[in-house]
Image (cartoon, rainbow, N blue to C red):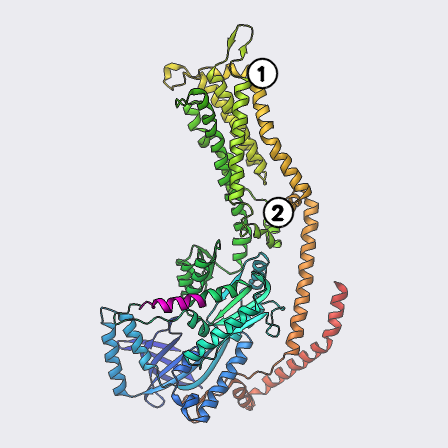
Amino acid sequence: TGVEQQIDGYRFYINIRGERHQFDVYNMLEFSSKRKRMSVIVRDPRDAKMKLYCKGADNVIYQRLREAYKPKGGDAKLAREWDKTLESLQYFAADGLRTLVCAYKEIGDAEYAQWLGRLNKAKAAIENRDVLVEECYDAMEQGLTLLGATAIEDKLQRGVPETIANLAVAGISIWVLTGDKVETAINIGRSCRLLTPKMNREDGSLYILDPDEKMDDDECERVVRNALDRASEFLQDRPLNDANQGFVISGKALSHVFPHRKHDARGREIPPTAEEAAKEHVLQQQMLKILQKCRAVVCCRVSPIQKAQMVSLVKQNVEGVITLAIGDGANDVPMIRAAHVGIGISGQEGLQAVMASDYAIAQFRFLQNLLLVHGAWDYRRISVLICYSFYKNIMFSTTQIWYSFYSGFSGTLFYDQFSGSLLNLVFLALPVLLCGVFDRPYSKEVAALCPELYENGPKNALFNLKIFGLWCAEGVLHSIIIFWTAVMFVDSTSVGDTGRVVGFWTTSTTMFTSIVLVATWKMMLETKTWTRWSVVAFVLSIVLWYLWLVVYSALPLSLGFSNQDIYYVPLIGMALPQWWLVNVLASVLCLTPAILYTYIQRMYSPTRLNVIEELEIYPKKRAHFISEIRAYQQREKQIEDQQYEEDVTRAHQTHLGFSEFQVGADHPDYVMSQHRFMNLAMKGRGFKKLKKILKKKKTNENKAKASKPTQQTNDTHMD
């Protein structure tokens, strides 16, 4: 209820069972993702003793309990207390709750003074300060006495299950790297649809590798190797990224795939020997081959460095893969930095992940729009932009090569140098700019309803070596058509009955006009979204070229624009019928094969993308298509919800309430369980009204359950 800051720490005022107590906090051993725990050293006013209270993950706290709690400790009662607490933790984790274990330790004043001196000396160290401070923390957090366990609900954000389901349908392999217990991670994986109902332990479609935390290192390594060998043999005939295969592995198992490195006196990591490195590499490659068979992978109880190691394993060993890491906390920063693309969620855990990421989003569900909508759109835009840019420049530049055969490779330009400089800057700039920024082959609504369209990206269906080569070959072919149609039909033709013939620059200008027209028509064929701005861009591209010809060629020579080569040449050329014939003929010869290929391909061998693009043209068919997809999704959701309710009913478990603290009732730290405390408290007279309310509520719930089958029947009938 209150806090005062002092020179040596903090002073807290805490209300315990209606009585106000003053706690003096001497030191706070801060939490870190590596330590997986935090502690506080206080002076307890109830018995005037100095105590250390610690909370953290159960596997971390277990390692720091007194030896009496462990199987070899000799105290069967304390060992049973830990087993009961662990059982409660498993119940809580099965319900998807986040769990922590609490413990404490009494500290003598002399012991504390000695430890504080070592801590201050470690904090004042110039070299290796963090390691020395952590060693001091670890030395104090030993010989703890178990208090109990806590569990809280970490509710999923809105839209997480739908987003993960759509990403899986899009063909994306989803790996979850979390610090939760195995049971919690599996439960969350089920609720967010990462682990499908077809994945279960019985038939091996959900393979779980979770060695006991109490197991020593040598035995654990042997168990992990044998388990990976069995998994490799079991999955050897499965295809890559099997939609019905999941794998769950714990951090204990990963610690033998990625062994912890020892450090020297200065805190530097000691590299492994060649034999150790080869041994680790074989095990890592074996695990990677196993995980590649699975659509869903869940890594539990992993540290931040293990998250980064898993991402690096995929990034460095799978050819052609693009890794994306998304997280919201500081413990996700190493993983985000290790991936090709890092995404940070700005939430309740600070902005460390956001600051280390490439993109930032407010909620996880926005990842669906980022990938399936804008990612798919931008992939096609950038693919067309790159291919088209090479195409038009190859088409323009190669005509100069063909002219070199006529000029004896003298280096003479076959076009006006000023006009050539403006080709990409002015005449062909607007169409490709609008296509690269605003073009979209399908709407946002269809992109969200059809995640399969995203597969074009991972499969490189729109940009690969073959497609790039076809664009380049098309540019060379079009340059041949444009060059020789201009040479054959325009060069050295007579002008009227005067006996005059057109010369070099008339042929060059005709050829340049054909290049502008063909490049513009080509961009029109690649544009899927037509707006008023698109029309303006295409019209303006052609108009600007003709306007430039007329104005630039008519400028007086005295102005010094160096237009003497084409002075009034375009006006002479445009008066010839051959000029217009060449422009039309070059356009038809260049674009007819592309149009015929597109027609045949869309009519007789359409892709999924082609079908969607056709639907976007017809509003009625598009609306009918969307309504059918939504109806199908609604039916599937009803089936999944019904199946989930049946599974819960069949596998209903009677779980404990909050685990009682493992100290005696006469101990000052004793706190009753929630269930027992409520039963005892409600015996008083002041709770009579509350009892009536709860009794009435229970009666209403029983009535609702009794009428539920009838209500379901009515709902089904209404549907």
Mark pair 1, 2: CA separation: 42 Å
585 or 368, which lies in front?
A: 585
Q: Position of residue 582 (x, y in %)?
A: 57, 21
Q: Quadrant of residue 716?
A: bottom right
Report the amino acid beneath label 1: Pro
Does residue 545 show up? Answer: yes
Q: Which residue is pictured at 46% across the width and 16% down the height?
A: 504
Give the magenta part as a residue range: 270-283
Q: Position of residue 433 (x, y in %)?
A: 49, 38
Q: Which residue is mark 1?
A: 577
Q: Quadrant of residue 598?
A: top right
Tag 2 secondary structure: helix
Q: Position of residue 480 (x, y in %)?
A: 52, 27
Q: Is residue 487 above or below residue 705?
A: above
Instruction: Tell me which label, 1 or 2, sits earlier in the chain.
Output: 1
Does residue 348 show up? Answer: no
Report the amino acid beneath label 2: Leu
Residue at the far right: name it: 717
Q: Is residue 17 above or below residue 566?
A: below
Q: Is residue 607 above or below residue 496?
A: below
Q: Which residue is mark 2?
A: 609
24 or 138, which lies in front?
A: 138
Residue at the far top: name it: 498
Label for residue 359? none
| Quadrant housing the C terminus | bottom right
Q: Position of residue 96 (x, y in %)?
A: 54, 74
